[in-house]
Image (cartoon, helix red, strand yellow):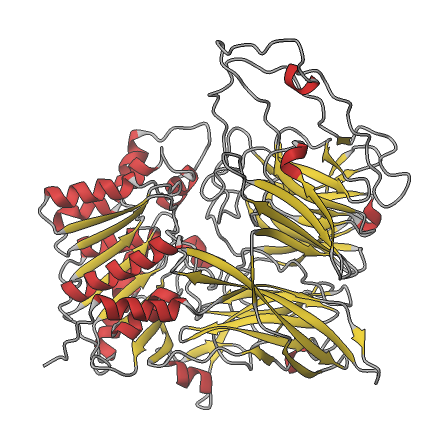
Amino acid sequence: RVPQVQPRAEELSELYRELSQHPGLSTACLGPDLTTQYGGKYCSLYTEWSQRDLARAENIKFCRQYLIFHDGASIVYSGPAGTCSEIKDELLSRESPSGTLKAVLRKVPGKEKEKEKQFLEVWDQNRKVKSIDLTALDKHGSVYDDDQFGCLAWSHSETHLLYVAEKKRPKAESFFQSKAPELGTSDEDTGHPKKEDAPIKVGRPHLGSAGGWLCGCGADQPVPQGEQFVYHEDWGETLSTRSVPVLCVLDIEGNSISVLEGIPEHLSPGQAFWSPEDTGVVFVGWWHNPFRLGLRHCTNRRSALFYVDLTGGRCELLSEDTRAVWSPRLSPDGCRIVYLENNVLGPHQQCSRLRMYDWYTKHTTTVLEAVPRQAWGEYSSGDVWGQLRGMLSATTLITGAFPGIYCGALAGMCWAADSRRILLDTAQRSQQDVFVVDTATGTTTSLTADSPQGSWSVLTIDRDLLVARFSTPSCPPMLKVAVLPAAGREAQTQWICLQDAPAVPGISWGIRTLQPPPEQEHAQYGGLDFDAILMRPSEGPTAQKPPLVVMPHGGPHSVFTAGWMLYPAALCRVGFAVLLVNYRGSLGFGQDSVASLPGNVGTQDVHDVQLCVERVLQEETLDASRVALVGGSHGGFLACHLIGQFPDTYRACVVRNPVVNIASMVATTDIPDWCLTETGLPYKPDALPDPAQLTEMLHKSPIRYVDRVRAPVLLMLGEDDRRVPPKQGLEYYRALKARGVLTRLLWYPGNNHALAGVEAEADGFMNMALWLLKHLQC
C-alpha cells in the first residue's frame, strides 16, 4: 500500500513559515578601493536582500555589508562586516561615481490625512547633507521607482541627479466649484504665475546657458473645469500609476528641481543617464501612439535610444526607430553604450540582440545576433553533469556554446574595467549562466561552466570585482564574488562564496531532455527538443513513490531555470514530486523554439507537457494514480487545457489567474497583441478582430474543453490583475459550476497578476497544498 500522509494545517503553515524566511538577494554595490598600512587593497560590498515577514504581512528589505581584500588578481580574504539591518521606506538609492556620496529616494507617511510624501536625500560618509521634500516643491508627480522607466543617476561631476517622475497634472475642478474669495489669497490660490526657476547648469558653466531645455515648472496654469474625470492611459500591469513620465534634474547645490524639455510628445522617456562630460542625457523613449499597451515583461514595444543635448535642447535619435530597445549601459571610459534589442511586436520575450553605439564615431554595431539554435554535440561517458542530472538524451551542450540572450535587463554596472568586455547572465536551456562578451570580437565565454549547476545572476562588476547570486531548486540564494581574469583567461574565474545558504534537506532534483514524437514535430522548426526539471522528496513517507504535481510555466515565452522557487520547494517538502516543464516556446532554447509556438498554443505546448508527464511516469517511481496540475497565467491556460484534453490523467488542479478564453480576453487585457500573436494572427492597433479570428481564439482556448473536465479545480484570482483580468477565471468558475464540477474560488483584493502580496502568497500556498492533499488522497 502507498504510504498516506496528511499534514495538518498547522504543520503546513510551519513549513511555509520556515521556507519563506529564506531571503532573496536583489542588489549589490562595491565601494571604492582603500589601501591598508601594509599596502593591501580592500573595499566594502553593500548588498540588499528582501524577506517575507508573515507577521507584518509585508516584504521587508535589509542590508548586509562585507569587506573584500584583494590584490587585483584574486580575492585574498572576504567576510561580513557587522550584522544586517532593515532598510525602511527607501524607494531608490544610488552611490555617486566616486563612492563618497549616496542619493536616496525615500517615502514618508503623511500626517493625519496628508498624502504620502517623497524626499530626495544626499548622504556623505558621515551624515545626511541634503533632504529635499519633492512633494512640497510640486514640480512633478510621484517619482518612478520601478525598473521599467525609473532611474536615479548621478552626473559625472556629482553635482546633479537625474530621475523620472510622473508629469505634473493640472488640478481640475467641477463646473459648479465654489470660487474662493479674491481678498487675502496667495498667488498660488488664484493661479497667478510664480517666477520660474532659472535653467540650471550641469558640471560646466556653459551648460544650460542657452535656456529652454529645462523648465522650472513653477508657473501654475488656470484651473480647468470639467477635467476631473478625464481618462488617463497608463502602462498596464504593475504600471497603473505610470502615464506620462518626464525626466527631472536636481541641482544639489542650488536646491532646485527642473523638468527636462525637448522630448518629443509621442515618446515616454525612461532608463536615463548622463552622457559623457555631462553634455546631455541619454534615455530610452517608448512610443505611446496610438495608445499605450502593457509594458511589464514586454520587451517587444517600439522604442529607441535618444540623446537630449542640454546646450541647445536638440533631441537626437541614436538607434534604429523600428525596433524595441532597453538597458543602455555606458562604458567606464565614456566611449560606448551597449543595449539590448528585439523586434517590435511578435512574442513578448525573444532571443535578443546585443548592440553597441560608439559615442564619438556615431557608429552602431551588432555585437551578438539572436541565436536560432544552440550548438549541440555528443557527450562522453565521463560527462559528470549529464550523469548527475539524469538526462534522457545522449547529447549535451558543446562546451562554451552561447545560447543567445534571454534576460530582462543588463546589470546596472556590467562593463569590465577595460571598457571592452561586458558581463551578462542568460537562460541556457533550464539553467542560468554568466557569460563575458568581448564587444570588439563578439566572442563569449562562460564564467560558470565549471561551477555548480543552477541559476546564476550578475549583480554588479566594478574594477573587475564581480558579484553574483547563485541558487538551485534545493538551495536558497547565496552571494558569490570573483575577480574577472584578463581577456582570454576568463574561463579560469574562481568563485568565492561570501554568504552561504545551506541546502534545504529532503529535496533532490535533475534536468531531463525530451524529443517530441515525429507526428508532433513543427513543420517549419523541426528537430526542437525541450527540458523539464524534476524535483522529488528524498526523505519522508512518500519518498519511494510520491504523488506528482505538474507545473508548466507562464508566458508562454519564459522559462523555469534551476534556481530557488518557494512553492515547488515547499510542495516537495510536503511530499510531492514536482515537474517543472519548459515546453517548446520557452526561452533559453534558441529563437526557433520561441518562434515555433505562436499559432500552436493549446496544441504544441499542451502535447509537450503531456508527453513529459507520461514519460516521467514511465521512467520514475511515481504514483501515476495521483497526478495534479498547478499553473499560473499561461501555465494556468495549459493546466485548464490538460484537465479537459486528458481528463483521465489528472485528479486535481490549481490555477492562478489563468487564461481560459482568448476571445473574451482580447478586449479587456493590457496586452491585446498577445491574444492575436499567440493565436497565430497579425496584430494591428487599428484593426478589430473579425468573427473568423475570434473563432480561432476560442478554438485554441481551454474553455473549449470544459465539458470534459472532471478534476476538482481551485481558482486563485487577483482583483487588480490587468494582464489576465479576473473575469477570465470567473468565466471558467461559472462554466465548471454549471457542469457540476467541484470548484472553489479565492479572490485576492489588492493583488495583481503575480499574486505576490505576502498575505496572498502565503494563503495561496496553504489553500493549494490542502486542496492537493485532499483530492490526491494523500
Q: Position of residue 33 (x, y in %)?
A: 78, 72
Regarding residue 246, the answer to whether it shows in the image is: yes
- Position of 426 with respect to 368 (left or right) is left
Question: Which residue is outermost to the right?
Answer: 205
Name the side, left or right, on which 659 lies relative to 271.
left
Q: Toward the viewer: 351 or 539?
A: 539
The one nearer the camera, 226 or 511, is 226
Q: Residue at x 58, y 33 (%)?
A: 244
Image quadrant holding the C terminus, namely bottom left
Q: How many marks?
A: 0
Percent x, y for residue 581?
A: 34, 65
Residue appearing at x 17%, y 72% in the figure: 6
Question: In which quadrant of the rendered image does the N terminus lie?
Answer: bottom left
Residue farthest toward the bottom in the current orientation of the protein: 382
Q: Nearer the viewer, residue 34 or 449?
A: 34
- Left/right placement of residue 391 relative to residue 715 reads right
Q: Quadrant of residue 551?
A: bottom left
Q: Nearer the viewer, residue 752 or 444?
A: 752
The residue positioned 58% from the left and 46% from the top of the image is 107
Can residue 284 be seen in this snapshot? Answer: no
Question: How far across and down, in percent of the image, does residue 438 sit?
Answer: 70, 67
- Say which residue appears at 49% left-offset and 34% top-offset: 113
**Relative to 771, is 657 above or below?**
above
Q: Position of residue 503 (x, y in %)?
A: 42, 80
Position of residue 118 relative to residue 68, above or below, is above
Quadrant in the picture for residue 497: bottom right
